[in-house]
Amino acid sequence: MNQSTNKITIGFSPCPNDCFIFDAMIHGKIDTEGLQFDVVMEDVEALNKKAFKGELDITKLSFFAFAHLTKFYELLNSGSALGKGCGPILVQSSKFKVESFTKIAIPGKYTTANFLLSLAFPDVKNKIEMLFSDIEDAVLSGKADAGLIIHENRFTYEQKGLIKIIDLGEYWETLTNAPIPLGGIVVKRNLPDDLKQKINRVLRKSVMFAFANPSSSLNFVKAHAQEMSEGVIYKHINLYVNDYSIDLGEEGKKAIEILFNKAQELGLIGKIEEEIFVPS
């Protein structure tokens, strides 16, 4: 918490789905119950790294990163990105097709995308970490043999001359019969329980306002969507914001627990002793 202003520090990405979800609460379009926010906007892997340092009170976090941080953070019931048909895609260049992949570009060590790559291809070792938006060009230029794309790049990779090797979201769904948990909104475990409950309520109201008023956030979304077309912006939001974003529900919570169990089976994380969800 920012002691000089009594504002709660909150981190989320500039991606359309996050801007859509958080617009109402950070711009006072709903009753925030007295909460004020000091906003930090970063790529999700940068937010993952900030969480490891405990820098933010509330933050968007890859579920694989959260699996390492359950002693310090709890998951809010609203704001998560889960779903079907929305997972990361491993791609290669149609121009530089290769049979074996010695260098794979990934959007960060602690991303759920990297966890899924480890789950599907446990023997892959040579991974190059880079900003997710640089991965397509790295593959096209031959700097990487393959690339793990996330976010809006799933809508653009084919027109750029890339071809799909495997959709890791489909792989996960076939393996588990569960939606893929990509990222969630977590809150520091050591905050007072009544404050965590208040944050939970305010975030839910923000998501519901966004659904009820889908054009209200458009200027905010566009301001951070770089060169994304409006069509891609709405495809992005529709893919990653859904009923699980309002409330995880039992199915969403079960999917997260499955992911954590798979990570433990692979020896990627230790046993989780804590209750990981903020009580509703």
Image (cartoon, helix red, strand yellow):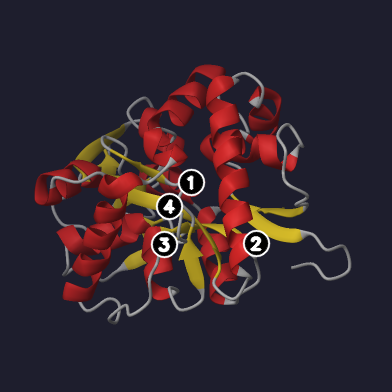
Q: Where residue 183 is drawn, which disc sits there?
A: 4
Q: Where residue 277 is drawn, which disc sits there?
A: 3
Q: CA distance from mark 2 to mark 1?
A: 15 Å
Q: Position of residue 42 (x, y in %)?
A: 62, 54
Give the label, 4 or 2, closer to the camera.
2
Q: Position of residue 118 (x, y in %)?
A: 23, 64
Q: CA distance from mark 2 to mark 3?
A: 15 Å
* Crowdedness near tag 1: few (<14), some (14–19) or many (≥20) residues, C-alpha within 10 Å: many
Q: Which residue is mark 1?
A: 78
Q: Which one is nearer the viewer's eye here, 160 or 181? A: 181
Q: CA distance from mark 4 to mark 3?
A: 14 Å
Helix, strand or loop at label 2? It is helix
Q: Earlier in the sequence, mark 1 or mark 4?
A: 1
Q: CA distance from mark 1 to mark 4?
A: 11 Å
Q: Is residue 51 above or below residue 166?
A: below
Q: Which one is nearer the viewer's eye here, 116 or 137? A: 116
Residue found 23% across the figure and 38% down from its top: 164
Give the label, 4 or 3, closer to the camera.
3
- The answer to which image quadrant residue 161 occupies is top left
Question: Looking at the figure, which quarter contains the N terminus?
Answer: bottom right
Q: CA distance from mark 4 to mark 2?
A: 22 Å
Q: Earlier in the sequence, mark 4 or mark 3?
A: 4
Q: Which residue is mark 2?
A: 195
